[in-house]
Amino acid sequence: MTMTQDAKKVLFVLTSHDDLGGLRSTGYYIDEAAHPWKVFMKAGYHVDFASIQGGVAPQDGRQEGDTEQEAFLNHPDVSRQLASTPALADVDAGSYDAVLYVGGHGSMWDFPGSEGVSRVGREVYENGGVVAAVCHGPAALVNITLTDGKHLVDGKRVAGFTNDEEAAVGLTGVVPFLLADELASKGATHVPGDNFTENVVVDQRLVTGQNPQSATGVAREVVALLAAG
């Protein structure tokens, strides 16, 4: 689809944290950006990237020879942006129809405490846009409050990496908190699916996915919401 002047715009937010509790390097999970990007491109949307600190965001989950990852990473616009992402604090949220908080374990460390994460999510949502997050990306949601002081997730159904999945990858004692529990503590109803199977939850204009397998579905639901809106 050819992009028009009134094409929808989506901001992908990436972690800048690259240390998995001293075990190994981490970052944003490439599939959780590549697969939604493909959906949005097919819909004729424009995608921009930002990271918490700016510059080159650390990557995780790279699979050499994976055709979808290669198409994403080697696309001229994507590679140009990823070579020097703006810091989220410098991004004007007003021009975006949706924001996607991309997962990867790194997001567990720097999304919750980021003022930019909270500001962008609040502004997009209160401007009538869609807030989306996948896998560990919902770590962004634990501290987003609306202008009335209420947590964005309060009273809403959400998906996110489950406690069982964290245990399955052996990182329960490594991550700074358990995502499902933290979301529940802010008033959300966490809706778990089977481990490592697609699970996408839509509640009003909040779209969340449980794991990498849910990344494409999250993007499709964002497109559906924006088309209906």
Image: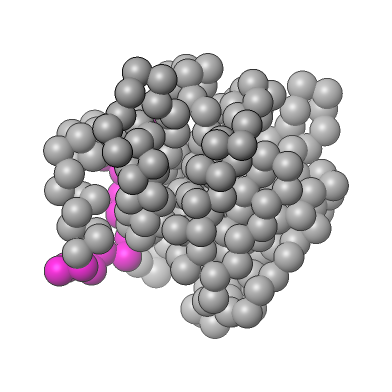
Taking 45 as reference, is 204 left or right? right
At 60% across and 41% down in the image, what residue appears?
225
Q: In the image, residue 138 lies at what x, y percent?
A: 60, 51
Q: Where does the C terminus fall, quadrant-wise?
A: top right
Is residue 60 inside the magenta stretch? yes
Q: Residue at x 58, y 79 (%)?
A: 195
Q: Residue 125, how many percent across, how many down?
A: 65, 29
Name which residue lies at 66% across and 74% down: 193
Q: Which residues are magenta?
A: 50-66
Residue 105, placed above or below residue 125: below
Q: Is residue 191 visible?
A: yes
In the image: residue 63, left or right of residue 7: left
Image quadrant assignment for residue 162: bottom right
Quarter residue 2 falls in: top left
Decide whether residue 76 is among the magenta residues: no
Give left or right: position of 116 versus 4: right
Q: Position of residue 27 (x, y in %)?
A: 37, 54
Q: Does residue 180 lie above or below 132 as drawn?
A: below
**Marker count (numbered):** 0
**Helix, strand or loop for the magenta stretch, by majority:** loop
Q: Residue 48 in the image: x percent, y percent?
A: 35, 32
